[in-house]
Amino acid sequence: MKHIKGSLLFVLTFTILFGIAGCRIYRFKDVNIDPDIKTVKVNYIINKARYQNPQLSPQLSDKLRQKINNQTRLTQVQGDDANLEISGVITSYDPTLTSGISNQQAATNRLNISVSITIKNRLDDKKSREETVTRNFDYAATLSLDQAEAQLNSTIIQNLTDEIFNRIFSNW
């Protein structure tokens, strides 16, 4: 009986320790930044979409700067000597009608937003690249676009910021 309890205790201890060690092996790493990159410059995101939401550019620019500051080790600089320079252009901000129909009436409309991001790596130009982020935001067809924007504004800014950040820094 003592032998069984001892063996059971050994197996249980080994399983727990292996499980804890296993968690380290499979840990998700969300930020992947070349250790040589120390500084970043985030330029103001320009709005060149046909429809202009005047809040989108400044809020998106500020939120991206905050996220980079809070979730990376990079120092933000204003000069042209940054190791990494991020620029963006809002290329599309288009409401579409009737993305969903219920009882033969429009139930939801959709706001499509696209942002083109340029990541310039001044230490290794081969690592410079462009990314396009496109997100769709549905809203009730009973709302005007102004009402929908007011309702969705924080969600739009948060989702676009997260998506842009992930495209720049994550190694998925």
Image (cartoon, rainbow, N blue to C red):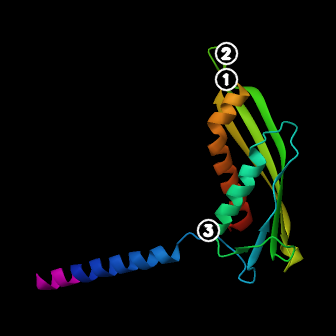
Disc 1: CA contacts within 10 A as few (<14), some (14-19) or many (>=20): some
Q: Main secondary structure of the magenta part?
A: helix
Evaluate whether residue 172 shows in this view. Answer: no
Residue at image position (40%, 75%) is 19
Percent x, y of residue 137: 68, 38
**Looking at numbered disc 3 in the image, what kind of residue is underneath it?**
Gln
Residue of label 2: 105
**Residue 117 against residue 50 in the figure, above or below:** below
The disc placed on residue 141 is 1
- Marks 3 and 1 sit apart, C-alpha to C-alpha, by 37 Å
**Looking at numbered disc 1 in the image, what kind of residue is underneath it?**
Ala
Mark 2 or mark 3: which is in front? Answer: 3
Discs 1, 2 touching: Cβ within 8 Å: yes
Whichever of labels 3 and 1 marks the residue nearer the N terminus, that label is 3
**Looking at numbered disc 2 in the image, what kind of residue is underneath it?**
Gln
Evaluate whether residue 58 shows in this view. Answer: yes
